[in-house]
């Protein structure tokens, strides 16, 4: 009998351990940020999760600051697994010290208490180094929670050689874009002006943004959802027309099939963000010299409205033991001129730091774009981004809804307009389910 | 996330449970041992002490890795987050939700539909896969030993490839523009990634992955059939066809039942394959399968409590289906006797 009792006792002990741990169930991060004391000569090690290959910039930091060693760990991009990983690491109490988090996802991380309050560690002093609207992306309730990294002002990449060969004018408005799409289809033997990626809600959002729509606003303590606003539906209707006439290639973007179509000239333009340059350069090296960049087509002729696709912060997650060191590194990474040049080359986007284009690698003529100083276009675009656009704290979930609705629409089962109306209701439900005050605008 | 078992289809990674069924070990796979009815009659009133000693490690592991996670998932499914402060961005607290999460999950049409989808999937995929496994096993049994070993190993090989890798591999064969299959077929090529075909494209991957594994279980059972039966059949003038139909297939029934239960559980848990395919095609929605739906809630929606409720519901359905199937099969068996 004693053996039996012992076995049962062990079993009970094993059973009790997690049950006891569960009593401390917390709503957000399982571990809270606490500054570990730093002794002289002691090396601090920081872990940084990102999906952009920025090892060169980090290597430079590690050479300059051997006392604070940063290790880059590449994770899957954003909603393709990166955020999932971050959320579970927070929940499990084993987060990295730093993580790349896009602006739209910051409210979501705030909602689970996943970010370190940087104002408590002297982050506010660094404000003047950054572009104001990007700085504000990391500010919640007057406190700083993430260091701005970069944004993605939109532009229009196009194949100059093919547009010339087929005698097509570069579109200045979306109407002209439509006419160009018809010509590309007629003269291009199977080519399309661009792809419509049903998987990319973020890409799509740039167009209502450019039109002056606002998918979400806050009014007092209430969230106002306005995805089916007039401006938003007008944009949806435009894309519906292109899809109905089969003027676009429907395929997920930045995936192997899409890259192949870009390489072979099956896709001849790409309305995309500044950081798209690195993707084209890296994945379609054979098209070197054939690309040019111009401003995004306009909804109203003569306008200069722009929008933003992407935009990341370097966030310091809740649970780090080295917030001060992490802050120091994040600031260096995003403002040091040498680092910025390396980040730009890695495709990290338009810097959030106040820079003078001429002083950085961004201002140089680029042989991939036929010697064009193409970033001048993006600098112009950046100054016309409507910075009042906001993201909901359930944006990742909203993107999933849009993805599903666009998938159905592009398969001939519904429309983009219908998708917007459908998503409107779902987003209201999501926010409600989170216990937030919400109403349809 | 909690899940009843990780054998058979769906989970992808070959779990520890599947590794414990040695290839070609007739004794270990001869009968669905865990579900055999309790032997009545001659049993000592007090179990041997030594039995507890041997059972101990298993029980401890079972408690720690199986019972506890289930308990924890059930516990979590009863909680919810309460938000405070302006726009809900203040410090959140955890409160008791009762059955709210379950009600919420069952109100989601997408989630309920996903059960229908995996059921449809299972009704088609499981018989196809098991039939293929059975045919392969019978053919192997007919072959000379030297070739049988080589072929058995190669049929089993896909099982050694993790589900994610297998899906990426098949993904390349499905995506138009890259796929040599669509290129060779030209305009006659089916759209593998379309809404109508996606479920069967996934089914194809799962068949490819697990037919060899199931075949191995059936082969093991075939090897355990006494040779005298074959001799008797031969004397009675039975050819290879008749031997297969009248002797082999009825006698591998227990193995078929076992593989079928594994496959039902695996089908309910379908996850890795659709998750990877979602990147390639929007036909796989965020709530394509119950498991994917729970995953989406846990990580895209950052609501682990709702995800836990969904996982518990999934486990209940998987449990009901596999036990339902077993009782159906054994009832027939009892009647047949």
Image: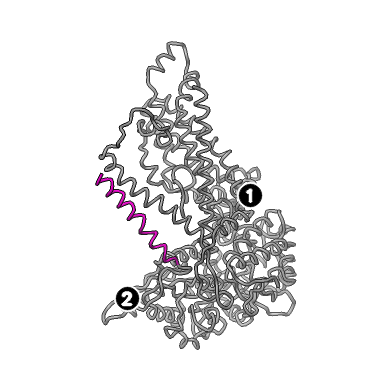
Q: Viewer-proximal residue, B300 or A53? A: B300
Q: Give the secondary structure at mark 2.
A: strand
Using the rendered view, name the quadrant where residue A434 is placed: bottom right
Q: Residues within 10 Å of mark 2 (few under 14, many from 20)?
A: some
Q: Give the secondary structure at mark 1.
A: loop
- Which label sits on residue A120? none
* Side of B187 relative to A118 (left or right): right
Residue B20 sits above or below residue B333 on the image: below
The coloring applied to the image is: one colour
Q: Which-is-in-front pick, marks 1 and 2?
A: 2
Question: Disc count in the image?
Answer: 2
Residue A40 sits above or below residue A195 on the image: below
Using the rendered view, name the quadrant where residue A231 is placed: bottom right
Q: Position of residue B164 (x, y in %)?
A: 47, 51
Residue annotated with mark 1: B194
Q: Viewer-proximal residue, B306 or B26? A: B306
Looking at the rendered structure, whether the residues under marks 1 and 2 are on a common chain is answered as no
* Side of B121 relative to B214 (left or right): right
Q: Position of residue A241 (x, y in %)?
A: 75, 62
The verdict on residue A24 being magenta is yes
Q: Residue at x 52, y 61 (%)?
A: A80
- Determine the main secondary structure of the stretch shown in magenta: helix
Residue annotated with mark 2: A44
Q: Position of residue A73 (x, y in %)?
A: 40, 66
Which stretch did the figure color magenta?
A1-25
Q: Viewer-proximal residue, A421 or B152? A: A421
Chain identifier of the residue bearing label 1 in the image: B
């Amino acid at each position: 009998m004693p053996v039996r009792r012992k076995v049962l006792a062990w079993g009970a002990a094993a059973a009790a351990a997690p049950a006891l741990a569960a009593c401390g169930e917390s709503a957000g991060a399982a571990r809270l940020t606490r500054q570990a004391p730093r002794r002289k000569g002691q090396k601090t090690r920081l872990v940084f999760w990102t999906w952009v290959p920025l090892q060169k910039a980090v290597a430079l930091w590690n050479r300059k600051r051997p006392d604070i060693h940063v290790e880059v760990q590449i994770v899957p991009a954003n909603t393709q697994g990166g955020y999932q990983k971050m959320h579970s690491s927070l929940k499990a109490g084993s987060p990295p010290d730093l993580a790349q988090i896009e602006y739209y996802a910051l409210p979501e991380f705030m909602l689970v208490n996943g970010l370190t309050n940087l104002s408590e560690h002297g982050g506010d002093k660094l404000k003047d180094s950054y572009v104001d609207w990007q700085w504000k992306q990391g500010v919640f309730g007057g406190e700083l929670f993430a260091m701005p990294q970069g944004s993605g002002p939109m532009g229009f990449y196009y194949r100059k050689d093919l547009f010339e060969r087929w005698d097509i004018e570069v579109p200045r408005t979306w109407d002209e874009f439509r006419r160009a799409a018809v010509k590309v289809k007629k003269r291009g033997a199977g080519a399309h002006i661009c792809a419509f990626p049903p998987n990319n809600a973020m890409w799509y959002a740039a167009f209502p943004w450019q039109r002056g729509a606002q998918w979400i606003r806050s009014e007092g303590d209430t969230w106002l959802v306005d995805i089916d606003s007039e401006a938003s539906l007008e944009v949806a209707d435009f894309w519906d027309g292109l899809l109905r006439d089969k003027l676009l290639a429907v395929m997920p973007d930045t995936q192997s099939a899409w890259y192949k179509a870009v390489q072979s000239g099956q896709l001849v333009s790409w309305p995309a963000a500044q950081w798209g340059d690195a993707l084209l350069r890296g994945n379609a090296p054979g098209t070197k010299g054939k690309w040019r960049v111009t401003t995004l087509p306009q909804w109203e002729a003569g306008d200069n409205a722009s929008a933003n696709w992407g935009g990341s912060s370097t966030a310091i997650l809740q649970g780090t033991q080295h917030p001060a060191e992490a802050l120091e590194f994040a600031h260096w990474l995003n403002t040091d001129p040498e680092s910025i040049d390396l980040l730009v080359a890695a495709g990290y986007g338009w810097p959030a730091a106040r820079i003078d284009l001429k002083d950085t690698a961004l201002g140089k003529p680029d042989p991939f774009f036929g010697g064009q100083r193409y970033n001048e276009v993006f600098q112009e675009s950046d100054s016309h981004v409507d910075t009042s656009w906001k993201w909901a704290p359930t944006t990742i979930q909203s993107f999933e809804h849009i993805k599903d609705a666009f998938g159905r629409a592009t398969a001939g089962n519904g429309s983009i307009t219908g998708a917007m109306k459908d998503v409107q209701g779902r987003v209201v439900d999501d926010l409600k389910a989170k216990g937030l005050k919400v109403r349809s605008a | 996330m909690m899940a009843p078992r990780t054998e058979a289809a769906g989970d992808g990674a070959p779990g520890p449970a599947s590794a414990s069924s040695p290839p070609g070990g007739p004794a270990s796979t001869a009968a669905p041992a865990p579900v055999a009815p309790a032997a009545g009659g001659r049993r000592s009133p007090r179990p041997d002490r030594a039995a507890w000693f041997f059972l101990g490690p298993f029980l401890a592991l079972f408690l720690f890795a199986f019972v506890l996670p289930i308990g924890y998932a059930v516990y979590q499914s009863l909680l919810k987050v309460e938000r405070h402060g302006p726009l809900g961005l203040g410090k959140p607290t955890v409160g008791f939700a009762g059955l709210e999460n379950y009600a919420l999950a069952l109100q989601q049409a997408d989630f309920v539909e996903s059960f229908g989808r995996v059921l449809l999937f299972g009704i088609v995929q499981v018989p196809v896969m098991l039939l293929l496994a059975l045919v392969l096993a019978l053919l192997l049994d007919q072959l000379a030993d030297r070739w049988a070993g080589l072929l058995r190993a190669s049929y089993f090989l896909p099982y050694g490839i993790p589900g994610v890798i297998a899906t990426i591999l098949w993904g390349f064969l499905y995506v138009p523009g890259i796929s040599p299959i669509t290129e060779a077929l030209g305009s006659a090529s089916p759209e593998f990634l379309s809404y109508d075909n996606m479920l069967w494209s996934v089914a194809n991957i799962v068949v490819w992955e697990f037919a060899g594994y199931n075949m191995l279980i059936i082969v093991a059972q075939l090897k355990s059939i006494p040779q005298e039966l074959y001799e008797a059949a031969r004397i009675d003038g039975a050819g290879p066809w008749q031997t297969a139909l009248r002797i082999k297939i009825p006698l591998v029934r227990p193995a078929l039942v076992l593989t079928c239960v594994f496959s039902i559980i695996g089908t309910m848990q379908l996850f890795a394959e659709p998750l990877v395919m979602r990147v390639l095609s929007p036909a796989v929605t965020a709530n394509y399968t119950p498991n994917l739906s729970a995953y989406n809630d846990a990580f895209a929606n950052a609501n682990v409590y709702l995800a836990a409720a969904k996982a518990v519901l999934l486990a209940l359905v998987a449990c009901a289906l596999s036990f339902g199937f077993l009782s159906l099969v054994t009832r027939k068996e009892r009647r047949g006797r």
